[in-house]
Amino acid sequence: MRSFHWFKRLSTIFLGFILFFTPFALLTRLSFWVTGKPGSLATQKASCGDTCLLHPVEWTVQPANWIRFLENPLLLTTFVLVFVAFLFGPLFCGWLCAAGGVPEFLGRIIPNRFKLDLRNSTEPSAIRYGFLVGFVASSFYGLHISCAYCQYATLQDITTAFMAGNFGGINHLTFSAGLITFLTWFVIFGLFTKGGRGWCNYVCPVGASQSIFHWVGAKFGFTYKMRFIPEKCIECGTCAERCPMWAIKMNPGPNRNYHACIGCRECKAACPNRAISYARGVDSEMTLLVPGVVQATGKD
């Protein structure tokens, strides 16, 4: 069951790659075709920059930049993902984001003894929200860091160069910020961190914005979220071990942190007693605004 689950996630992450990234970028090409803008499904001009998920996070609090959404409606993709996160959880992060999925899955090749295990050393959600605040605030001072440390552009450059057999074309790694991004996102916090999603845990503002809305949405009975079935749980800790986002802590039974959960359902696939479900309803335990703290709110 778990192997089949991995195959499903790998398939959808590949789908995310061909939707957003050159040389495919099918979402952009489809937009060109529908609107009649320059370019077509046959051109190679589309890239992940046309559906940038980082800039809109900055521009949301800058009315002067709202005109950009009218100029390029594809930039509204970020808000679509936030709405989906409210109703169903951050499914883009768990199922479509190639920038998060590639290091997660490639990292499984590397033995755990060579990896950093940061699950219990820090509270990553609080750090990520702090980075989100700094990310948005920096734009008011002219520090547009979304391009400087863009993991999406870095992944696109690497894959495009690999497919063309020309690694001299990895432009994003020729300046210091891009190289630091690659080493941090893909190597240190990716391949050599347990779970492979250290970047997602600590830094990503796209994931942080979705997590906020998922946390709010999880309070309502009509939204979908990961739910535990206490009477079935045998407290084996397998779910916490398998979660790539460190969203589950054993205390002594499993407590989940909706600020970190990306709805990947790795916990559900790994649970030996089927004590985890992805469903609607009011959960019996809700994570407070301070990540990592859990309060009881009634039974399922």
Image (spheres, rainbow, N blue to C red):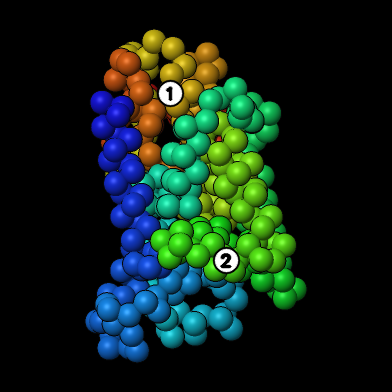
Q: Quadrant of the N terminus?
A: top left
Can residue 256 be seen in this snapshot? Answer: no
Residue 282 horizontal/vertical position (percent): 35, 35
Q: Which residue is mark 1?
A: 239
How far apart, in angstroms, are the residues tagged by discs 2 and 1?
42 Å
Residue 294 horizontal/vertical position (percent): 54, 29
- The residue under the point 42% across, 52% down is 97
Quadrant in which residue 59 is drawn: bottom right
Q: Secondary structure at mark 2?
A: helix
Can residue 192 be seen in this snapshot? Answer: yes
Q: Earlier in the sequence, mark 2 or mark 1?
A: 2
Labelled pair 2, 1 in contact (Cβ < 8 Å): no
- In this picture, is 34 found above or below 257? below
Residue 158 horizontal/vertical position (percent): 51, 59
- The residue under the point 30% across, 15% down is 273
Residue 224 horizontal/vertical position (percent): 32, 42
Say which of marks 2 and 1 sits in front: 2
Observer-nearest residue: 253 or 247?
247
Observer-nearest residue: 70 or 295?
70
Observer-nearest residue: 70 or 289?
70
User: How many numbered callouts?
Assistant: 2
Quadrant in which residue 227 is drawn: top left
Residue 129, labelled with which disc? Answer: none
Q: Quadrant of the C terminus?
A: top left
Three-letter amino acid code at the position of disc 1: Cys
- The residue under the point 38% across, 32% down is 266
Three-letter amino acid code at the position of disc 2: Gly
- In this picture, is 77 found above or below 142? above
Observer-nearest residue: 26 or 110?
110
Q: Which residue is mark 2?
A: 168
Q: Is residue 142 left or right of residue 9?
A: right
